[in-house]
Image (cartoon, grey):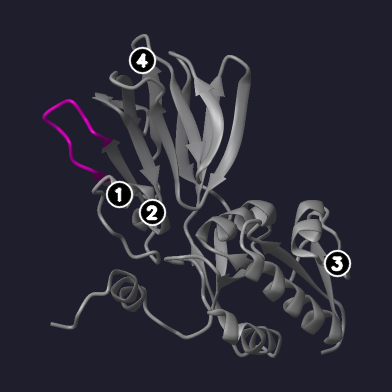
Amino acid sequence: MTGERTVLVVGHADRPDAGVLARRAEDWLCGNGCRVVATDDDRRILGLTQADVWMPDLTPSLALSVGGDGTVLRAVKLVGEKESPILGVNVGLLGYLTAVEPPAMLDALADFFAGRLTTESRFVLEVAVHSTSGVTRHRALNEASLEKLTAGHTVRLQMRLDDAPFTTYQADGMIVATPTGSTAYSLSARGPILSPLMKAIVVTPLSPHMLFDRSLVLASIETVEMEVTGSRAVGLAVDGEYLGVLEPGDRIVCSEAPHPAKFVKVHGERFHDVLKSKFGLADR
């Protein structure tokens, strides 16, 4: 390898084997002319002694995620709009977003830097949060979810599509998901499974108290707005990270983000093969 390559290493804090793998990757990367960077927490928890401190203005050549899907989501957040490819090493359970198992990690790194691997782009939602404190923007690879705060009560959420009123949902909450997120929280709410290669928006109600209880699959160019109505506040989470409370009158606007997330493909498996494997589906 010639020239400096910067690799961001992100690991699972609660899995000791993630630290072992991260240190193994660090040794290999540094020994092959790469610069390794990590957040202060990852350097400490994973025991990375050769890594420099991650700075948000850096554009890594690769982000190496050692953990489960949650760790991949954290890598996506750190990379942000830079479109740096992400390679996931599965130290979790299902691992929809991870590309390789631990024994194949070093071979995958060698193949990536030798130019033998390709990448694929994933649709990302931009979630604009409008509240009395102003407007904040977040990126969601999986979903934005609005949920009730009190057991035994429903909340009211008015949905607008492309600025036109659609309907008001009375439910436990709502999920606005990407195709990648269709196998995450949305799936547990009985939402449809979409190929991650699609560009679409999936809106799924949580335990709706109304006759219309179906998911909507919308085009990527459409805009989904959810406003908190009625008298009850809701909690907002983006990709599983709790962002706080939305009061009546607050709203989120979800649309296609200008920059996708990129993932390294290792085995050339189709999404359908991964789905069959994760759910243990038989050929017949």
Where does label 2 land, which residue?
184
- Taking the view exactly as shown, the residue that stands out farthest to the front is 16
Q: CA distance from mark 2 to mark 4?
A: 27 Å
Label 4: few (<14), some (14–19) or many (≥20) C-alpha neighbours in 10 Å = many
Where does label 4 land, which residue?
229
Where does label 3 land, which residue?
51
Where does label 1 land, which residue?
188
| Mark 3 or 4, nearer chain start | 3
Task: Report if residue 10 lies within the magenta region.
Answer: no
Look at the numbered discs 2 and 4 and tell me whether their residues touch, using CB distance below 8 Å. no
Q: Secondary structure at mark 3?
A: loop
| Mark 2 or 3, nearer chain start | 3
Q: Amino acid at mark 3?
A: Ala
Look at the numbered discs 1 and 2 and tell me whether their residues touch, using CB distance below 8 Å. yes
Where's residue 236, x and y in %? 48, 31
- Whether residue 138 is visible here, answered yes or no, is yes
Q: Amino acid at mark 1?
A: Ser
Q: Amino acid at mark 4?
A: Thr
Q: Secondary structure at mark 1?
A: helix
Q: Amino acid at mark 2?
A: Ala
| Mark 3 or 1, nearer chain start | 3
Label 2: few (<14), some (14–19) or many (≥20) C-alpha neighbours in 10 Å = some
Q: What kind of secondary structure does the magenta stretch mostly adopt?
A: loop
| Mark 4 or 1, nearer chain start | 1
Q: CA distance from mark 3 to mark 1?
A: 38 Å
